[in-house]
Image (spheres, helix red, strand yellow):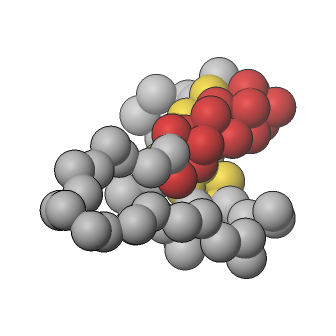
Amino acid sequence: MKWRVILEPDQETQEWAIWCPELPGCVSSGVTETEALENIKEAIELYLEPEPIELTEGAIAREVFV
């Protein structure tokens, strides 16, 4: 799946700040642009990782692909 990310130079740290506009709060950074891109990939994977859930009796869990 493809995600848009925004890279911005951070004037305080001299690193690259990076965030994904479609995923609120999904942010990262890196010393280089390449490192920032690798770090945001990991952040997106963690953001999208499903949380464990407890199902009530009779409930069924399914997965869908989008």
Residue 56 image offset from top left, x and y in percent = 17, 62
Quadrant in the picture for the C terminus: bottom right
**Residue 42: x %, y % from top left:** 62, 34
Residue 32 appears at what percent x and percent y?
74, 27
Q: Residue at x 81, y 64 (%)?
A: 2
Whether residue 65 is visible: yes
Position of residue 4 in the picture relative to residue 14 (left or right): right
Question: Given the current orientation, which residue lies at the most extreme front position?
Answer: 58
The residue lying toward the viewer, choosing from 57 and 62, is 57
Of 9 and 60, nearer the camera is: 60
Horizontal and vertical percent position of residue 30:
62, 28
Q: Is 2 on the left or on the right of 41, as rendered?
A: right
Residue at image point 37% right, 57% down: 25
- Left or right, 38 with reference to 20: right
Picture layout, residue 47 above or below residue 55: above
The quarter of the image holding the N terminus is bottom right
From the viewer's side, name the closer residue of 17 and 27.
Answer: 27
* Location of residue 15 with respect to 54 vertically, above or below: above
